[in-house]
Amino acid sequence: MAVKVEVLNLGDMAPVLAGGRDGFYRTAVYISATSWAEDVTDAAAVLSKQSEQCRAYLREHKELKKVETYADRNSVRDCRREWLRLLDDAECRRFDTVLTSSLRYVSESFSQASVDAGRFFYPAGIRFIAVEDGFDSKRDDMQAYLERCANMQCSYVANRWREDKFSNQKIYKVAVPYGYRYVADGNPQIVVDPVTAPYVVKLFEMAIQKTPVIDMVRYMNEHQIVTPTERRRQIYGEKLTGSPYWKHAVVKNILKNPCYVGDYVIGRSRERWVNGVKTEYKKLPPEEWKVIRDYHEPIISRETFQKSLDVLSERSFTQTCRNRNYQNPYRNVFVCGCCGTLMTCNVAGSKNGKAYARIFCDSGRFTKDGGCETYDVRQDEVICKMKEAFAAEIRLAKHIRDSLPFIKESGWYQRSLAGFEQKKRGVQAEIEAAADDGDHADALYRKLKQVIADKEHFEKMFDSVNPWIQQFAVMDTDVLPEFDRSTVRAVFQKVEVFRDGHIVPHFKSEDWRTEMEGYWKEFETEGGEPLWEEETAQ
């Protein structure tokens, strides 16, 4: 509903503020239980809130010195008595600044409040501060502030008008969705639009069949089905601007609109204001909607609508980086085995029309030297090979863990420990010989510390506390974990993928595995059994 509100044209005048003597401003605080932008039901709570806001502002701004508080408690017939007294005191220059919570509490009428603030205080040089609105006439533009308040007044009046019509079970044209028509003959009604209602049914059928929204949009555009904006132009002759094509947001709004089950619903969203500026529409929960059940003829059943909502809730349509990572757990894991570039995971179509997930290297597109020749492999085939390599790694870790007691009892293991002890004693002897040379002795102490650390690392290598053994030996090859994002990151460092589909996985704690493999080769050279190669070949 259009509301004509006069906004003061203040021009370029910028009067000098009065007061500010010795850096202080004599301040009048005004609080009121009336408002032109809301219905006040608890006057005491509203006054208490305003009083606390003003006190907090005074504590933060020491240059404001309160001289008096004016409070209109709405307990008498004239609810502006204290405000009129404030205006008389302003004429007598008893204060330099007016401090209030918001302009909406100044009067029951926005027009009167804007006149007092814009045509009385501003030209007279009296500073006006509205704490909740974030306005201070000393630094802010008064005309822009009054325009913001006028927009708030228009929004409030329109909401009241809609709520009054809703309470009388009357509808308005804007709330009639696509698939229906607004008939204003006599008593306004909502009737089914025979042209667009079948398309609404089609969208809900596709949603129940779990058809992606992008396919729904493509279907509507390919069949050149009239859009909601174009249909409103045809029916009502409204001059609306908008895209002539269907989009994701339009389809999802239809699938989430409860009006198609026969309920008349308003108030699904509310304007959100911050410092008097409308920033966005805030979605409200269903329990706060205003609903008249079975008001008009339904297009779909309630069961169909609920199934559609369930399908939408199961799928994520928000294209954020976090959701993409969740949907693809292998993101940033595959690297090209030829050039080492990070490979891309996406969906591609084949000649038979069936889409498949692929991994492809596209480094030649971004490298001036040509890079690697573009190729791709099927992601499902690579994942199967990753699971096979994962299972083989688990079997190997279990085999090594079971062989640790045999290794520790072998002569090679005892000779290796004896070698560390011999190095330790040799360094200790060098330290005693170089006791007089302080710098050389310090270097020998660092060498001794390193020898002791190497021995502890060697003992840890052939113990169950080995990080590689700890990670893989506790798993079961018969029940492999699901490859979600956390599992992939915990198991694989990266996976090299080659053109022929061959992969080289690099696991976590791979340094411990490589070092143990080197020690095992020493063990075999001195007569040990080749357990490592036998297990790896399985």
Image (cartoon, rainbow, N blue to C red):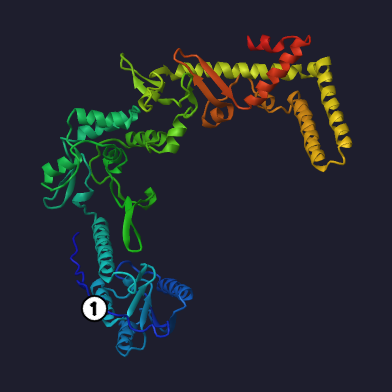
Give the camera-side residue of 281 and 177: 281
Q: Position of residue 151 (x, y in %)?
A: 25, 63
Q: Position of residue 107 (x, y in %)?
A: 29, 75
Query: Furthest residue to the bottom?
Result: 92
Q: What element does badge 1 sit on?
A: helix
**Identity of the amino acid at label 1?**
Arg
Against 382, residue 245 (above or below) is below
Q: Is residue 77 visible?
A: no
Q: Is residue 329 left or right of residue 153?
A: right
Quadrant of res 477: top right
Q: Indicate the quadrant containing the C terminus: top left, top right, bottom left or bottom right.
A: top right
Against 272, residue 345 (above or below) is above
The residue at the point 79 percent across, 41 percent down is 439
Q: Position of residue 88 (x, y in %)?
A: 30, 88
Quadrant of res 157: bottom left
Disc 1 packing (10 Å; few <14; some 14–19; many ≥20): some
Q: Position of residue 375 (x, y in %)?
A: 39, 18
The residue at the point 55 percent across, 32 percent down is 486
Q: Report the number of numbered marks.
A: 1
Q: Is residue 120 visible?
A: yes
* Residue marked by disc 1: 119
The residue at the point 17 percent across, 46 percent down is 241
Against 381, residue 175 (above or below) is below
Query: Furthest residue to the front?
Result: 437
Give the camera-side residue of 10 and 191: 10
Give the camera-side residue of 164 and 354: 354
Q: Is residue 373 left or right of residue 433?
A: left
Q: Indicate the quadrant containing the N terminus: top left, top right, bottom left or bottom right.
A: bottom left
Q: Is residue 235 left or right of residue 424?
A: left
Against 145, residue 418 (above or below) is above
